[in-house]
Amino acid sequence: MMNYSKRAELFRPLRTKYAAFLASILWKLTHDRELFTEAMQYALLGMWQNIEKLNGKKAGAYCGGKEI
């Protein structure tokens, strides 16, 4: 299991890179502030919980074949 500091180190750049894109998609899908906020939190939590899958060579299935 990855420790908190390593997880945070990997999460911050991903959040910075994809937050605006994710927000635009979720807003277009929900058109509701409460539902949007909940969906955004759920998506970011999913990134946090699965950060080790979104990093390195195993990331291809999640990131279009590119390493992050």
Image: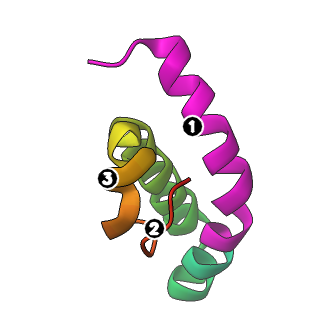
User: In front: mark 3 or mark 2?
Assistant: 3
Mark 3 is on which residue type? Lys
Q: Which residue occupies 73% across, 66% down?
A: 20
Earlier in the chain: of badge 3 and badge 2, it is 3
Residue that badge 3 annotates = 58
**Which residue lies most toward the bottom here?**
28
Query: From what the image shows, is residue 7 above or below residue 68?
Result: above
Name the element at disc 2.
Answer: loop
Name the N-terminal-most of marks 1 and 3. Answer: 1
Whole-percent x, y for residue 35 in the image? 49, 67
- Name the side, left or right, on which 14 lies relative to 60: right
User: Looking at the picture, which amino acid does disc 2 mark?
Assistant: Cys
Q: Residues within 10 Å of mark 2 (few under 14, many from 20)?
A: few
Examine the residues drawn in magenta and state their main secondary structure: helix
Q: Give the extent of the magenta segment.
A: 1-23
> Does 40 sit above or below residue 21?
above
Look at mark 1 in the image and give the residue it sits on: 11
Residue shown at the point (56%, 67%) measured from the top left: 36
Nearer to us of marks 2 and 1 is 2
Q: Are marks 2 and 1 in contact (CB under 8 Å)?
A: no
Which type of secondary structure does the marked residue at label 3 adopt? Answer: helix
How is this picture coloured? rainbow
- Point out the tag, 2 or 1, that comes first from the N-terminus: 1
Q: Which residue is mark 2?
A: 63
Which class describes the residues within 10 Å of circle 1: few (<14), some (14-19), or many (20+)?
Answer: many
